[in-house]
Amino acid sequence: MSIKSLVKKLTPEFLLKAYHYGLALLGAVWYGFPSGKLIVIGVTGTSGKSTTVDFITRILEEPFDAAQGKHGDKVASLSSVRFKIGEKEWKNQLKMTMPGRFVIQKFLRQAVREKCRYAVLEVTSEGIKQFRHKFINFDTAVFTNLSPEHIESHGGFENYRKEKLKLFWAAKNIHTVNTDDENAKYFLDVPAHKKYFFEVQLEKSAPEKRMATDFNGKINWIKDKDAHITAENVAHNLSGIDFEISGMHFHLNIMGDFNVYNALAAISVAKAYNISLETCQKALEKVTGIPGRMELVSKNPLVVVDYAHTPEQLELAYKSLAPKSLVCVLGSCGGGRDKWKRPVLGKIAAQYCRDIIITNEDPYDEDPLEIMEQVAGGIGEHKHSIVLDRKEAIKKALEFTQPQDAVIITGKGSEIWMCLASGKKIPWSDKEAVIEAVSGAKA
């Protein structure tokens, strides 16, 4: 156990909270409360946050009406994938989706200095728990979806959801909610000046999804049709996703039909700021991929890298590659957290993949082989192997690959570090490991 972990374990909870809150206040004071000079949009949920942040950023940057000289706005954005201020962007190398208080406040001040109008931030439950969202003037809160994650850290799913809800309490002006998620009702109950809703229209309409609740739980039928964004006629394949909104056709040049929800979240934000569907359409059609999110790294053989690390994410990623026969490199879950999902991930892999290779991910202070055995426990008798070295696991997956197959590597996405015991980190990239393995196989 690292010194940092030991200190955290021995420090009383109230002192930890005071420490984190104090840092949040000090960071805001030090950098002059910069968020007050920006329109800040916070995106929270279990999955899709980084992609949604990217989509929102691209839409806000897209020229409104070139004929009338209305150009896109200057935007700053922060996610687990990257930092961006205007045209300058750089990788998030912190191994932390939502950085510390001083880092965020400094980032926001830089955005102000660069004359950005908007700041789009990925907001996590762990970050909220440590008050990293405090003293940031959120104008809009976006809810993508919710499924069990960080359960051990929060002490239960309800506590996890409560942390997410705090972003909505912090953002008083605009809320946008995925009404296809069963947890939507909790986010709808938080009061806001304006509310926007998005869903995917299936064959059978669900009228109960076309309603909102006020703070007192009273049901109100939505009268403003512009506040409800619905995707219809959704179709997807390995080359992209097509759908319609109010008769307008949209095409995303990325894999994963679940990305429709991320696009809808971004479009609902755009509607809240009076940005047209035409502008959204143009911006989203330019997206060719998000690093580490269903990222196509090789076409021959077909190899995809994805960040999926929850049961729901993993199943959606596998489904997106149908009807391909799947060879999967399964990340074995980070050490010290969410141990419950290890056999669950193994079970899902057994349902969708022909060959499974379990490998190391971020073991931290746990025994990596023990973690991998726990994942294997959910696979049962299905064909699988355990390969400790992640690079070797990727090479082995390519050896199994046939022309009709797809290799999918999950768990780390675009992360650039592998975290080992005693706080040690080593450089890592799934994408670079794939490129090296493919080049070696073709040599």
Image (spheres, grey):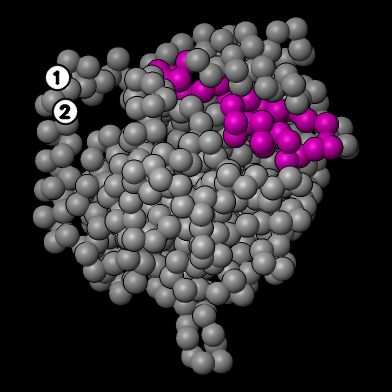
Q: Reply above or below: 430 against 379.
A: below
Q: Please report the bounds of the magenta region as a residue range.
A: 311-339
Considering every residue shown, the one lying at the far right of the view is 403
Residue 317 numbered mark, or none = none
Mark linked to residue 16: 2
**Mark 1–mark 2 CB contact (< 8 Å):** yes
- Distance from disc 1 to disc 2, alpha carbons, whole Å, reads 7 Å
Residue 420 visible here: no
Amino acid carrying label 2: it is Leu
Nearer the observer, 376 or 222: 222
Location of the C terminus by quadrant is: top right
Residue at screen point 71% across, 56% down: 232
Q: Quadrant of residue 294?
A: top right
Left or right, residue 172 beside residue 405: left
Point 61% across, 39% down: residue: 306
Comparing 79 with 198, the one in front is 198
**Image location (x, y in percent) of residue 26:** 11, 48
Q: Which residue is mark 1?
A: 12
Q: Residue at x 47, y 74 (%)?
A: 274
Q: Amino acid at mark 1?
A: Pro
| Quarter holding residue 225 | bottom right
> Which residue is rendered at x = 16% and y = 50% of the image?
27
Find residue 10 and report its horizontal and vertical position in percent: 17, 15
Lateral position of residue 182 relative to residue 151, left or right: right
Q: Is residue 213 left or right of residue 8?
A: right
